[in-house]
Amino acid sequence: MNWDQIQGNWKQAAGKAKEQWGKLTDDDLDVIAGRRDQLAGKIQEHYGVAKEEVERQLSAWERKASDSWFTTSKDKS
């Protein structure tokens, strides 16, 4: 999955981001609004990790993204 798909479905992806990085607040996720650089900055801010580590985490998270993240229960019936 590429970042454009994540950004385009940010409301659903934001929940997955919060599962991954629990220190992110709803306000953070609203500000991020699907922008990768904003997400990276908030992760650095909340977790105090280096930019390289944030990029590693984001790349791994992005690779895990799948269509099932964006499928609602209504779509599954």
Image (spheres, rainbow, N blue to C red):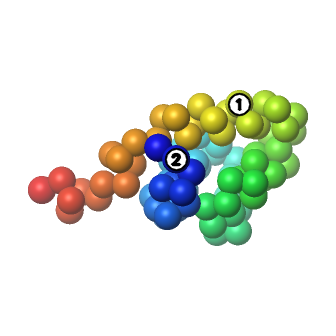
> Disc 2 marks which amino acid?
Asn
Q: Badge 2: few (under 14), some or many (20 or more) residues near its Cα, within 10 Å?
A: few
Q: Residues within 10 Å of mark 1 (few under 14, many from 20)?
A: few
Instruction: Please name the residue shown 66% across and 39% down the image.
Output: 58
Residue 43 place in picture, x, y as percent: 76, 46
Q: State yes or no: discs 2 and 1 in contact (Cβ < 8 Å).
A: no
Which one is in front, 2 or 77? 2
Residue 25 location, x and y as percent?
67, 58
Q: Spatial distance from mark 2 to mark 1, Cα to Cα?
A: 15 Å
Task: Please give the name of the residue rendered at 48% of the width and 35% of the height, measured from the top-left corner.
Answer: 64
Which residue is drawn at the image coordinates 29% and 58% (left, top)?
72
Mark 2 secondary-structure assignment = loop
Task: Locate residue 21 relative to residue 14 in the image: left or right.
Answer: right
Q: Which residue is at the front of the view, 58 or 19?
A: 58
Nearer to me, 74 or 4: 4
Q: Pointer 1: what residue?
A: 56
| Of callouts 2 and 1, the N-terminal one | 2
Residue at which label 2 appears: 2
Q: Which of 63 and 75 lies nearest the eye of the viewer? A: 63
Under mark 1, the amino acid is: Arg
Label 2 or label 1, whichever lies nearer to me, is: 2
Residue 39 visible from this viewpoint: yes
